[in-house]
Image: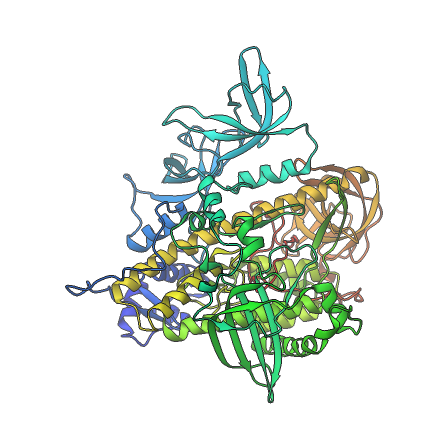
Amino acid sequence: MHVQIEAVSRALRDARGTGLTLKQLAGQLHLDHAARQPLRRALHQLLGEGHATFDGHRYRFKPAAQPAAHGERRTTERTARQPRALPAAMVEAQRQRKEPEAKPRGGGRFTTGILHLKPEGYGFVSPLLGGSGRQDDVFVPPRRNRGALDGDVVRVSVSRGRDGRFAGEVVEVVERRRQLVLGVYRAQAKATWVEPHDRAFSDPIPVPRDPRVKDGELVKVRLQRDGGGPLHGEIVAHLGPRGDPRFEILATAYAEGFSDEFDPATVLAAEGVPDHVRPEDAPGRRDLRALPLVTIDGEDARDFDDAVHASRVGSGFRLVVAIADVAHYVKPGGALDREALKRATSVYFPSMVLPMLPERLSNGICSLNPDVDRLCMVCDLALDGEGRPVDAEIYEAVMRSHARLTYTKVAAALDGGPDSDVRPLVGDLRVAHELARKLTARRRERGSIDFDLPEAKVVLAEDGTVAGIVRRPRNEAHRLVEEFMLAANEAVARFFDARGLPTVYRIHDQPDEEKLDAFAQLARLHGFELPENPSPGELNELLEKLQGTPQQKALNALLLRAMMQAQYSPDNIGHFGLAAPTYLHFTSPIRRYPDLMVHRLLKEHWARGGSPMRQREREEQETYLAGVAAQCSERERAAMKAERDIDAYFAALFMVDKVGEEYEAVVGGVADFGIFCELKDVYVEGLVPKEELGEAVELDEEHHRLRVGKTGRSWGVGDELRVRVVESDPVRRRITLEPASAPRSGSWLTPGDIGSQAPTSPRRKPRPRDQRAAPPAGRPPPRGSPPGRPARRKRRRGGGR
């Protein structure tokens, strides 16, 4: 269904500044409920083009900006000055914001996105900017990629073919995203080449002969393209024989455009950064070195970008959240900034991290290490006795962390068993714990959604093999830190919003209506009701009812998939999952570029003395921030994809020597080709192909079950069974299972029985987890597959929603 943008714009213009809610707009345009999603897409495009504004409740028409008055000058020092080499996502966002989408000759349209090539020669382009809706991938037939490689950012001309289907042809390679590749070195006679490990490469890569490398060994290759000539490469590292899991990690990272090395200019810039706070850095900053700020992180953490302190003040509380002042050292437009923007995020794997910033900064001067002076940005909150914010100050300071605490030590101290080094801080920690509980209560009171999905953690042995896959610990210390980070992020967002300052918000649109309907239908089949157009609070009430039931994990995951992707944007539409009218990321500038950008924007505001920006300068700023937001959103999705892929690799690697073993399992999802099962106490997922379930197996889409012929047997979410491991393939990230015993938990029910069954007795109550308002990790469901498949994602600490 299509909604005319012109009609939406006209309706907003006719409102004459009073604005219209989504419901009022739909009523004026005579749109039914099914047209709400297309209407949101039209509104998002108007917001992106700067023709409308949104205050979290009403949309308003934004008139075209007037030219700057004669003689008006730009400021000579601008924090958000654009770097010379802009990432493709930024270029595309700025182009779309400035000009309407051009159309190719003969109709159709142009789309810019990431090319995903298949070994057979064809591919798909995933649009970089899908707006609030979700654009379908564009099919690219064989020999229509114009030399672009898998992972490159391309511009395609989309048109309808003779068969009536839409297809695209690459007209421009916007950005060569793929720079490195891993493969097997081959040398025969005078010919030398590398067989790429990545199956997206269908042809070998010619390389010069390297006497250090033997035929059959693994190498790292830097790709080279001389003008329009054929692809070739240069060997830059010798990786030795096969078998090292690090090889798979790097191959996956390279495929998504990430790297384990920094270019010489970035390394040189990092070496020029001081390794200590100099006397000339401190003037003008508040001195918080006497305040007992502490960092709380995991045992294996090496970079500490937040420190906290909570205390009682009268009948209320004071919460100080100090964040590493990365913006002081990473100047806009420099080599460090260009590389940080290109990466936009750190990427976390079980055995290694690909940082956004070089180690000299991320683990050195920018890390809030204990007992050393550090520069910081501070959110200083005053809260009443129930944890409601009363006032907030944001300022620059110099601090000294009084202790490097871990989640385990803090949780033990709160339980009454503090270590000797934590004992002097127990009083402050108990106050912090009390405040964190009140903050949690306030969030739930307003309707913030708290998903409860246990997460898997890959435990590696010293030799890199998988020692085990366990449930990732989550205790009161984790919740304490996360609540404080959320409170700081919201406070800083309110600071920008109240002053009308441009910034990069973290937005989360309302759920996809079709997927939410599918979730509601499945929930009703299991005896849980959900009202039409549920609020975040009503969704949270349902999640609380699900706790302890066999269906909990699958329904939690399905609801997550119904959620729209959280993303970054200069246009504030609020955060649905948090039930927050305004929200951004401020607390992790070492590993997230949006946080660094927010710090810069604060400094720019203070440098102007709090005076408002000129109109033209503001528009330029907003256009630039739209590009930053697009780049960071795209790189975040790429990082999540890489992390999911490696989690799946290690899961399959862990199960290789367990072929033939049997496990208790729970059905987490159904599809027309089989059932997905979560193995209890192992935290891995496998597929039971429908051929293993019997003959004439068909999908009952209405009840979300697979039915086995006329036997009366069926399989659905929450059913328990015993399975046997048939095959585990780390290369394809696939674990294949088969039933090892008769079905249990209602698998023999007839269709009429479904929905009348009360939830089974609860098992061990899972611990709650933070909700990140993004589709869950785990491999994405196949095209057209029904809902119900569970998924997992890596945990990110500190307000990462």
Q: Residue at x 48, y 39 (%)?
A: 151
Position in image of residue 766 (x %, y %): 74, 64
Residue sitting nearer the eye, 481 or 37: 481
Give left or right: position of 423 versus 579.
Answer: right
Q: Split into 4 quadrants, where in the image is the C terminus?
A: bottom right
Query: Quadrant where the N terminus lies?
Result: bottom left
Q: In this picture, is 559 found above or below 428?
A: above
Which residue is rendered at x = 57% and y = 85% of the image?
384
Does residue 232 appear left or right of residue 362 in this picture? left
Image quadrant where residue 281 sits: bottom left
Extreme residue toward the top, this view: 189
The residue at the point 54 percent across, 57 percent down is 365
Which residue: 38% across, 51% down? 333
Outermost residue toward the front?
Answer: 279
Q: Please state the horizontal and vertical placement of residue 542, each as a whole percent of the image.
A: 65, 70
Of residues 532 and 413, which is closer to you in this image?
413
Whether residue 621 is visible, yes or no, is yes
Measuring from the top left, give residue 199's x and y in whole percent: 57, 31
| Vertical side of 353 occupied by 515: above or below | below
Q: Is residue 745 left or right of residue 326?
A: right
Near-viewer residue (354 or 520): 354
> Please, is residue 619 above or below residue 154 in the view?
below
Q: Residue furthest bottom?
A: 314
